[in-house]
Image (cartoon, helix red, strand yellow):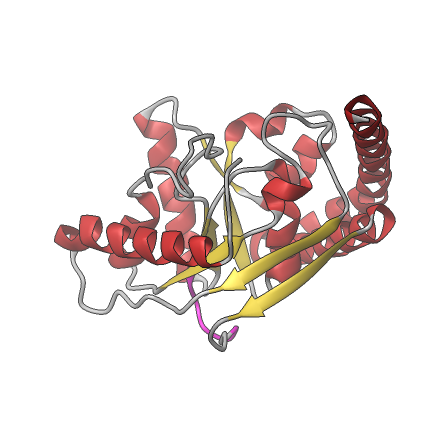
Amino acid sequence: MKFTLQLLKAIYSIYALLVFIFWMFIALPFVFIALLFGTVKGGNLIYRICKIWAFCWYCCIGVWHRNIYEVAHDASKQYIFVANHISYMDIPPIVLTMNQPYRVLGKYEMVKYPVFGWIYRAAVILVDRSNAEKRAKSVRALKAALAKGISIFIFPEGTFNETDAVLKTFFDGAFRLAIENQTPIKPLLFIDTIRRMHYSSLFSLTPGPNRVVYLETIPVDGLTMNDVTKLKQQVFDTMAEALQRYGYTTK
């Protein structure tokens, strides 16, 4: 029985990957056209294209998206969005949940994937932690986006959380950026992504819900760089407590 279940998961995962690639090639020419409209307008168009791509893919593979608002969300305001990170299925909820201009901070390594890397490079602000100069370039790009009224999305854990805890240690970057630019933090929770695809295998994909929870905004008014550690801990505690309330587990 266990072997049969694993075989079905593998078949379903391969099917989902093929459908993902199909919609990727459908989206690709529209992404190239969007690039002609410049960094801001073109970038916003690319995220709308990715949103349609993700929606079509979900429809084909039996996954559905839903936003849960613990408090009302004002999409007219600017935020530093942060979320937990544990699965490749964390990516579609980003584009499906957002209804305002934003940019994602993404790992440079992802540009190496054929075709997908082209879209990824066009859509995200790349971070390459291999040296200080490249990290500084990423920070300048983030600040430039904020100056144009665009929100930022960051995974503060940096990489997949493969620990037994609901969250692993946060990096300082998101919180330094929030304080320096006096932009509030908006924590999001991805509570189903590990159930949809476990980080241990690309062949563990399953159909079902992929919900996003919006938590209360955490203001940074008047905070200074001396408050980075305090702010980081506040956001960490808020997200960890809420993840536990939703029965989230990394297993």
Above or below, comparing residue 219 to residue 38 in the picture: below
Q: Is residue 31 left or right of residue 238?
A: right
Q: Residue at x 38, y 68 (%)?
A: 217
In percent of width and height, residue 134 lies at: 38, 29
Of residues 175 and 159, which is closer to you in this image? Answer: 159
Q: Residue at x 62, y 37 (%)?
A: 88
Q: Is residue 9 left or right of residue 197?
A: right
Q: Quadrant of the N terminus?
A: top right
Residue range in magenta is 75-81
Of residues 250 and 183, which is closer to you in this image? Answer: 250
Q: Residue at x 34, y 63 (%)?
A: 183
Q: Quadrant of residue 164?
A: top left
Magenta region's main secondary structure? loop
Q: Quadrant of residue 114?
A: top right
In percent of width and height, residue 96 lies at: 66, 58
Is residue 80 magenta-colored? yes
In percent of width and height, residue 102 lies at: 53, 58
The residue positioned farthest toward the left in the image shown: 226
